[in-house]
Amino acid sequence: MTLFLADLTIIAHALFIVFVILGGLFVLKWPKVMWLHIPCAIYGALIEFFGWICPLTYLENYLRHMANADTYQTSFVQQYLLPIIYPTGLTTDIQLILGSLVILVNSVIYFFVWKIRINN
């Protein structure tokens, strides 16, 4: 059961990353989501800018340890997403680019949200 919870944590982590990057699209349909999305997007960008490790990584490691399964010492992105998306290791420059992309993508989305709301 504990290993299952660790896997659920991975899924939740992946969904959180998608929400950080593209959650502004939900605001087009449900404007109140903005109040949840903006802090998440800021937090996601800050994780990249400062090289922090998300608390979900610690939770997954704890659950894996409790299940006597392998743990890892790096972040979720480095362990699961980096090998798929990037052929080499995560550098500070790449993290700065990723954080900037979170801000840029969401700024563009929120610009369109703002334009749609003004025109209605």
Image (cartoon, rainbow, N blue to C red):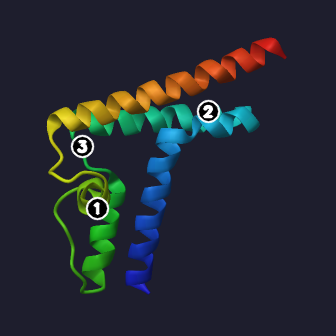
Q: Which residue is mark 1?
A: 58
Q: Which residue is mark 3?
A: 52
Residue at 30% x, 59% y is 84
Q: How many marks?
A: 3
Quadrant where the N terminus is found in the figure: bottom left
Quadrant where the C terminus is found in the figure: top right
2 above or below 85? below
Residue at 33% x, 54% y is 55
Indicate left or right for 89 with 108 as reference.
left
Quarter-of-image position of residue 112: top right
Who comes first in sequence, dot 1 or dot 2? Answer: 2
Residue 83 at what x, y percent from top left? 24, 60
Q: Which residue is mark 2?
A: 35
Q: Distance from label 1 to label 3 (Cα)?
A: 12 Å
Residue at 18% x, 32% y is 93
Farthest right residue in view: 120
Q: Nearer the viewer, residue 83 or 70?
A: 83
What amino acid is found at the position of numbered circle 1 in the picture?
A: Tyr
